[in-house]
Image (spheres, rainbow, N blue to C red):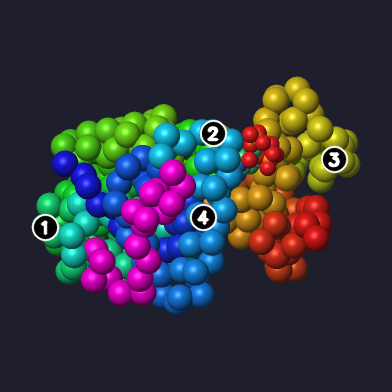
Amino acid sequence: MIQKIVVVGAGTMGHGIAEVAALSGFRVGVIDVSWDFLNRAKDRIKESVVRLYEKGQLKEKAEDILARIEFNTSYDIAKDADFAIEAVPENLELKKKVFTTLDEIAPPHAILATNTSSIPISDIAEATKRKEKVIGMHFFNPPVIMKLVEVIPSKYTSEDVTNITVDLAKKMNKIPVRLKYEIPGFVSNRIFIRLLQEACREVESGEETIEEVDSAARNKLKLPMGLFELADYVGLDVVVDIWNVLTTRGTPDVKCSMYRNKVNEKNLGVKTGKGFYSYP
Ligand code: CAA
């Protein structure tokens, strides 16, 4: 029975996942390394919950939902957690540290999930003494709006833990897609990166412009954003990370320099104010 969920990492994904958990009735703990990050997360969650409340989309008062969330720089708030979701930057060593700490502090029954979009779940699980209770639970940005959650068992994950995670995603009002095992890129990013490869091919061949590809994606494929716009939104560094994982673990690389060039220029998309488009 899951009552308390702890989220490690209060950034774009972490604060959104914490909000979704609180909106679904769970007690929530949010952990990050500094109060600056935590206070920013608190403000963003409040703004979003109040927006939902004012639109009449909540059954409870905004303050009751917000009161269920505690913030701390200490892992002590994981002592009574039933489920933890790690959402720190995509760096294996960092994630391993988080999992080793959670493994020491969270109660033995707690499931430890990672929101990684590209790192093998088994590699993360090996940092713990409860490998069968480690699983991938991959949300999409913005977590409060996006319905999809990928549930990814590693080679160690028990069937029970996978079932509990699928149920939890449903309780969070999400649509879980349960993978059989941890294929590189899971499902959505395999498709996403291939779309980005095709988009790049069109532009680099000189056939079409970025704006034309994005207009086709919006108005023919009916995506909510153009492909380059979505790459900017996800973060071009994240796109290149996922691309590298896919190409080093099986999918043929495609000649394309657009995304890497932007990262080399330190134009990472929305988060730096400039990518393929500008964000004042
Ligand atoms: N909290 C509450 N409500 C929110 C919100 C938030 N954080 N963000 C957006 N909304 C609401 C807005 O209030 C608005 O509601 P109304 O229609 O009632 O006014 C609605 O959502 C739409 O928002 P906007 O009007 O601001 O903007 P939009 O229509 O352009 O939608 C978007 C924004 C939801 C981000 C939409 O463009 C979208 O779905 N884009 C695609 C996002 C996507 O594909 N994400 C996955 C990326 S991949 C990933 O995350 C994982 C990975 O591994 C890389």
Identify the residue under disc 3: 211
Q: Most extreme residue toward the left, as rendered? A: 108
* Separation (CA) of disc 1 from disc 2: 39 Å
Task: Look at 45% across and 77% down and name the residue there.
Answer: 34
Q: Distance between the residues labelled 2 and 4?
A: 15 Å
Q: Which amino acid does label 4 sit on?
A: Lys
What residue do we see at 44% from left, 44% from top? 61
User: Where is 197 relative to 7, above or below?
Assistant: above
Question: Which label's residue is closer to the chain start, 3 or 1?
Answer: 1
Circle 1 residue: 108
First of labels 3, 4 by sequence position:
4
Give the quarter of the figure containing the C terminus. Answer: bottom right
**32 relative position to 142: left or right:** left
Q: Does the magenta stretch include residue 198?
A: no
**Residue at the top extreme, as displayed:** 220
Q: Which residue: 34% across, 53% down?
A: 68
